[in-house]
Image (tube, coloured by chain):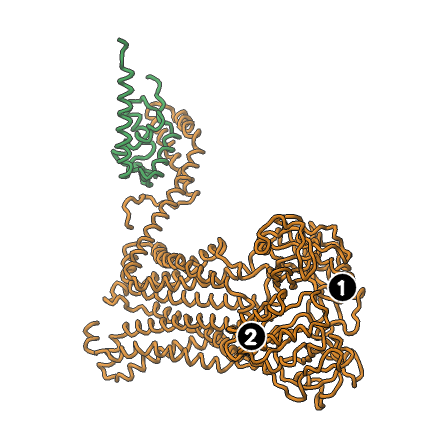
Chain colours: A orange, B green
Amino acid sequence: MSHGKRHFDLGKGTPEAARADMNEELAFHVDERVRWLVARGWTPEAARDEAMRRVAKSEGMLVDSAVRKTSKLATREWLRDAADDVRYALRGLRRQPGFTLVAILTIAFGIGANTAMYSAIDALLLRALPFPEPGRLMDVVQTTDNNATQPWSYPKYRFYQENQRSFRSLALYSSTQAILTGNDPERMAVEEVTAPYLSTLGVNVAIGRDLPTSLGDAPGAARVALISDALWRRRFAADPGIVGRSISIDNTPWEVAGVLPPGFQGLSGRAEVLLNLTSRNADDLNQEWSLEFSLVGRLNEGVAATTATREAELIGPRIYDAFPMKEGLLSTSERPQAWSATARSLDTIRAAPALRRSLLVLFGAVGLVLLIACVNLANLLVARALTRRREIAVRLAVGARRGRLVRLLITESLTLAVLGGIASLGVAWLGVRLIAGLNPSEVLRVQGLEGGIGAVGLEQTFLDSRALFFTLVVTLGVGLVFGLFPALRATRSDLVTDLKAGTRGGGQSRGLNTSRRALVVTEVALAVVLLTASGLMIRSLSRLLGVDPGFDSRNVLTLRLTVPEGNFAPDSMPGFYEQVQETIAAIPGVEHVGLSDCPPLNNGCNGTILTFADRPQTAAGNAMVGVHWASPDWFRTMRVPLKRGRLFTDDDRLGGPRVVLINEAAARQFFPGEDPIGKRVAVYQGGFDKGAEIIGIVGDVRYGTIDSTARPDAYISYSQARIPRMMIFVRTTGDPSALAGTVREAIRRVAPTMPVYDVRPMSTRVAAARGQAQFSAVVLGLFAAVALTLAVMGIYGVMSFAVAQRTQEIGVRMALGAARRSVLLLIMRDTAWLAGSGLTIGVVAALAFGRVLRSMLFEVSPADPITFVGIVLILAATALLAGWIPALRAARVNPAGALQGG
Amino acid sequence: MPPTLPLLKGTLDVLVLKALTWEPMHGFEITTWLEAQSRGSLDVDEGALYHALHRLEERGFIGSEWRLTENNRRARYYKLLPAGRTHLRTEGANLERYARALTTILGVKPS
């Protein structure tokens, strides 16, 4: 090729060939030496002996050196050819800057988005858990016959612990909230844990010591805590003297044993303090059916995970036998019959299932975009190859090997891919920053976040060597995928035709054109899949936006206020809250102030069993209701309508007759054809198990998720029960956020030691509940737009090219009297055929893909006919438009010019 | 006949390049050419020769190909490449200067 000093034996380059060559060379040398010696009077035998002797001593060394030399030369030649090819490719790309730029940007976006998505998946699903020997860590849970998992109570855990042999250590933990009391009270996430928590996970304290094992298993142990590095720096100025000192949590003194290493905040990923769980008193901790703890264990040396699982399944039923369930103990909707237990790798529960699903769907979508981009690039390259067919044919004619040409063309596509891959790192960097900033509980439905280890989260998304390796592999893959096909097609040349081909450089390249058409069909089909997916998500989103959650979220400010335990006698609490309400109500711009213990769209609230005074009491007859504590004004504040009866009044207070409100769902379900008003029911919470009278029916409010219909609910007046944690709802005349500071200030005047937190408009809570659908719809919509653009570009390119190629034919037809209209039809029919094939294949593929989406959709079938028909129409219209311009060009062909030009 | 001389390190490469300035040769031809030009005072060891040829080929100074000899036998012929010619010029000149210096010093008679 371009360099002159090529070795005149290219050699086969293999070690075997090198060895054979060397041996042959030496044999020849020996023969020559013999001939030479014989000519000088040696006997043939003596001559051969002498010649052999001279060669034999270095034969082995020479064979080795020959092999070395050959492989070095082969490598060098390969590299030199590759460098030539790259130079050649770069020259070619520079000559077509428009094409090059479009191609690089397409690849950069495609690969960058994939790398970012991969990084998220790596952080959430793939990367090893940040603990030593993470494979030895297991999550142990109770299971029930309805396939649910249940947490542990302390006595049940103790039973399991005493009967198991698989685990070296086991630790209970549970995530909760507490208030760091003192001058500047702060509410924070904490974990209650048993002493071996850190040693089980393999985490060491940074300062001080771990929770001492001397705390033992008995309830009522000393109050010892570990604090997070973040809290230590924020609240204690990173003072090492904190160890051994006492801090006040919920008005109780706790001794700080040590500080956690930076970045570790418990398995919840949020805990600021780890509290010694066994410090609870015996009455509290020995509740057999107080199921509140998770259990993590580290396997013994040499014990397989499957052994631990089998063992847990054997111990499980015995736990239930040891602690049988009593009536009314459990506030779940169903009461399971058979209980057992199982152990599973901690890794399997690392990500919440909904999050895992969304990520995988988005990863699939972003992969499809890349595939479409590849198809488009293949298309562009085939077009380029068409224009270069003469050049390729000439090269083949003068003896270039086909393999060498394929390599040249693939080098070109790889060069493009690598340039795009480098540019993609910028896109990936932006994408990763975007993802790491996402708060899954805002972006995703809260419901989806059940399960999962908070210690593994999207905020751990970053570009690392694994992501870069992923980029490299994808880049090379992309280069091969969109380069190989055109290269193979272009070099399968019919020499004669191509050399004879006219100046247009195309000639009779029907085969190549067929492959371009196949690529366009593929592109349209892939676009259908992406467009329907995003169409379904958008339909689902509009359904969600149309849902009436049962209250008016506009102009409502919500905030939480928690009374630390021990601050008040429980009986004086309603009085305190009244004072708070009055203070807030006095603020100008405030219309109503209401209190409730649990906000709507909270992924469910507290619930219990409901029984009816006038019906026989059977286990099967027990109904489940959600229980809410509310102030009389809460219903006006949230604009929850009263359907019948009356609301609470200020006269419904502690000591008076107990009254409850129920929602319409409860009225429908429990009192079909009856008037519930005046009926007496027992609600097994807040002392209402002694019976209460139903005084009214209010509208349904969605407490779970926005896409689940309201369940039966009962409301208890907050002044008739004791509850330390209330949420304040403020209806304002203007923008609720504007009043946030004033409301906070007002509360501080009344209750300076109580932390106010979680201050936000109700509308943002609703938006968060709709977040996942919104997020997925927006991202999928973006991908779909890209796919649509690429598909349109593909159709336009192919049709333009086809018209250009057929100019002569069209000219002849028109000279023979064909009408312009029929020429237009000819081209449009062709376009329609391409688009139609793509659409048909695409719809079939989309129907198959839709099943994956089912769980992400709300009130929309994955085969929703409106979406499918709409998408097909949109795509068909765009495709025909893309064909229309070239068709018009064809119809304007000047017959005389076309015939001469040919 | 005086005993043959062992080759000084590094000189063989230059001598081989020099031999190939006449025409492409196979290994045995190079041996005999060197022996003949030195009037029998150099004995070229086979191991050293072929090792030098590999080295020179690796460095791009010579190329090789299989050809038929006059007797119709296949033999590997070595050919000087432009880079080898340049190398020979500089290294050859160095060696010559070195040899001259040696001769001068060793030729000095005690006065």
- In depth, the one of B49 and A85 nearer the eye is A85
Crowdedness of circle 2 by 10 Å Cα count: few (<14), some, many (20+)? many
- Residue pictured at 64% horizontal, 68% vertical: A562
Nearer mark to the viewer, of 1 and 2:
2
Amino acid tagged 2 = Leu
Secondary structure at badge 2 equals strand
Earlier in the chain: of badge 1 and badge 2, it is: 1
Chain under disc 1: A
Residue A567 image position (x, y, % from top left)? 69, 65
**x then y, percent, for residue A237:** 57, 52
Q: Which mark is residue A284?
A: 1
Residue A418, percent from left and from top: 39, 56
Q: Would you name the residue on which mark 2 appears?
A: A557
Which subunit holds the residue at mark 2? A
On residue A671, the disc is: none
The quadrant where residue A479 appears: bottom left
Nearest the eye: A525 or A37 = A525
Residue at left 66%, top 67%?
A563
